[in-house]
Image: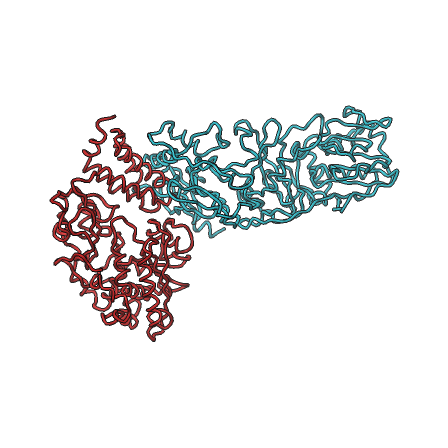
Chain colours: A red, B cyan
Amino acid sequence: MGYPHSHELEVGTILSRHFGDPEARDLKTWLTYGGYEGLKKALDMDPAEITTVVKDSGLRGRGGAGFPTGLKWTFMPQEKKGPHYLCCNADESEPGAFKDREILRWVPHLLIEGCLIAARAIHAEHAYIYVRGEYFPFTNILNDAVVQAYEAGYIGEKILGSEWNCDLTVHIGAGAYIAGEETGLMSSLSGGRAEPKIKPPFPAQSGVFGSPTTVNNVETLAAVPMIVVNGSDWYRQWGTEKSPGTKLWCCSGNLVRPGNYELELGVSLKDVIYEVCGGAPNGKRIKAVIPGGSSTAMLTPDELDVPSTYEGLQEAGSSLGTASPIVLDEDVNIVQAMRRIADFYAHESCGQCVQCREGTSWVAQILKRIEVGEGRLSDLDTLYDLCEQLTGRTICVLADSVVFPLRSSLDKFRGEYEALIGGRA
Amino acid sequence: MNETINEAINLTIDGVEVTVPKGTTVLQAAERAGVVVPHYCYHPGIPSRPAQCRMCLVEIEGQPKLQPSCVLAATDGMSILTQSDTAKEARRSVIEFLLLNHPVDCPICDAAGQCMLQDYAYETHQLESRSHEAKLVLGRDRIADDILYFADRCILCTRCVRFMRDVAGDEALLVAQRGHKAYIDTFPGKDLENEFRGNIVDVCPVGALVHEDFLFKARSWDMDSAPSVCPGCSNGCNIDIAVKENQIVRVKPRYNADVNGFWMCDHGRKNLVMANRGSRIDLPLIRRNGQLEAVHWGEALEWLAANLPDGSSGHAVVSAFDATESLAAVRALLGKLGIEGGGYRMSRGHEAELGGFPQLKLRAERAPNAAGAELFGFGESDGLPEVSDGDTLVVVGDRLADAPAEYGAGAGFFLYIGSHLSDAVRNATAILPTTTFAEMEGTFVNHEGRVQRFHQALVPPGVARPTWMILRRLLTLGSEVEGPLEARDAFAVAAAESGKLAGLSWDEVGLKGVNPGGSTAPAAK
């Protein structure tokens, strides 16, 4: 099992260097690759020092929101009054995203190391890795690595002879997209339904089991060990001032070379799609790109020449999200694609907020009706209005997530909707 | 108190200035300003605030994003708009969403007329839908032995789930499935058997949870309602009795912060709906020539005044279900007859406490006014007194339903004052028809000595009268002094005679009750 594609634009240094190498899963081999050097260094560092290095590196959360990681860690109470927890969010469920999966299955020790360093930085004595239920085979790989790390003294009591203790538990979710939302994840981990909770209280005040908690994405934590080993300036050699470092891309859809690529942030999205992935196969034209996973606004081919940074894509009216572009070629029916996206969100809505519970499924139903040729022109007005009603009114952003692709598809591909409707009022 | 004043917060709600203590939510502050913010998931008696119905979204002047007022803390200088275009539009859309898959079966729904979804749908003028889609049908289910769940009417506010979890301390309910297919259910293999489960029907803001005892019985606008006190045990939960065509069709808890909060137990509910079973006595009867004969009140009382023996050996049985005013009058009568002592019988049962509101407890003593009876020297007795031939026997209120058929047959004089006819009652020398507590006004004294008033809910049958009215009239027959004619006067007489309640006024007792022995602070609300 190897990695099918690679490209000269790739920076294979940090996360993906050992992708495709099954030996890397074994602790012995991993140590020869320089594994756990970051942890050793971190054990000699003050927790505040670790946070400073990560803060200086400019590392931003890779779960989609791009929040500065070091800053997030500083939200944890400085004075410890009870247990602190670190949660690694491995509930990767965004359609189009398959980057955390690759880390889990090829370099589990890198993730474990990142979790431990982060746990030390936030004074946590227990780290949880919450893995998506469907990632069962990869969870087994991770579990094997955790067992090895425990046996070798990298996790547990008096880690590597130091005075520091930290446990690590792998928790398998039951397969809900909404468990990937941090408060939903914490509810689920605490034994409840995966339902997002209103903030405040924020996780750093009251998270898992009511204790201060930090939730970080897999890819974020996997980047931490190398930053600690090599320093923040080293990390900043890639990327831009505001979006430093490298990013794992998961490119799917109508592409010649779909797959995972580790690229420097700031590379033009156009290059990612055409250079790295080779554009659409069979000489087809690309119709639309959903750049950051299904919850981001669609871009047309002439909108792709933007730097792939958090800011760059925001300026282009979309979002970097999880850097998981889904490419739709000229044969794809936009209405059908949008209906499938809406179906997903309707299926995954937890059902707490009325707008999301009822609105997402209503959107999906209207789109289905248009798709089968029973739409009316007034449906487009209703859809636009629903975009308003589903934005910014709910506890979490699941409802907003259906609005981004929906509104952009209505704005940019209205002709396709109208063609299916055929003028019925 | 000073602390509260120091931490006072001033804000305006729709332009109305209001001062509230720190920690108040905007929704509560709005209530103080006289502004009702529509809401579903928030319930003042349920601690958790998921802010999930999104109905109470309000605009904070100067901020683009609407915020849920049920969890939003009021801060100094805040200006809240509940009637701005954005806030109104947000509410309108919540109602539109809720109605998408709602069956709109108001014509057969028990909640119609008392439904928050119906009210707001009318308020926001949403009598037609933009939806062309087929409605999702989830159907209905029996969620407990006596409670039905209409899933299609449910708006998933989860008040019921959270009442069980937060207040009853019994995680019996859950939201099953998710998204628009979600519904309320019991955990697999576990039944909803909690003794406070009836409250989930009360907290339901729509007609999703319905008591089977009430199902299809009455439209809300066809019912009358009277504030009352539950006679199910000595806790004295405040209730509202709903009446249709002179029948009790439903009982709901009435808020009292010191006694029962927003809640009551199922024993109390069931007990009351069944309260009127049996044969009622509706005319005074006196025994002449060995036969019971119906007479009018005047004749009955005169006959009694002439024939009641005095000074003889006598026994008295009273009831802890009778009003304090009646028990006082009985003591006065016994005094005149020279009968001392007397007692009440009381059944006992298991206890059950509402974890989230421990003042509310189904108490072992299954009668509402034992403490009131004690005030007038009546003690609890295990059984009925043995009556020797020729003795005088006075039974007031005790239905004697379990007494042997020949009980009291040998008495020299057997006066029975009560509401229901049983075999032993037929042995009486005179039978006077009285009202049940639901057919009169009066007071009960609960287990902690709290005096609480109940109002008349039903019209009594025939010429039945409250016991106090009958006896006070009998006692003043032929005298210049007129006995009390209204409950408030009867209470004043009783309070004076009791000693302990002396000086307590009817108005002071009010609708929330007073505990003259305990802390005198009136209820907070």
Counting from the top left corner in percent of width and height, residue A277 is at: 15, 52
One can see residue B45 in this view = yes
Q: Which residue is drawn at 16% across and 60% down?
A: A11
Whether residue A263 sits left or right of residue A116 in the image: it is left
Q: In the picture shown, does residue B244 fall above or below B13? A: above
State which quadrant residue B315 falls in. Answer: top right
Residue B486 in percent (x, y) is at 68, 31
Residue B62 makes an appearance in the image: no
Looking at the image, residue B515 sits to the left or right of residue B329; the answer is left
Toward which corner of the image does residue B378 lie, by quadrant? top right
Q: Which residue is drawn at 28% across and 49% down?
A: A94
Considering every residue shown, the one lying at the far bottom of the view is A161
Picture residue at 31% right of the left edge, 56% below the top: A90
Q: Residue B299: horizontal and vertical position, in percent?
A: 80, 24
Which residue is more in the foreground, B323 or B39?
B39
Query: From this viewpoint, which residue is outermost toward the front?
Result: A1
Residue B76 placement, left or right of B376: left
Residue B370's x, y, as percent?
70, 44
Q: How many circles with numbers are drawn on the protein?
A: 0
In the image shown, does B12 or B100 lie closer to the viewer?
Answer: B100
User: Which one is nearer the viewer's eye here, B338 or A10?
Assistant: A10
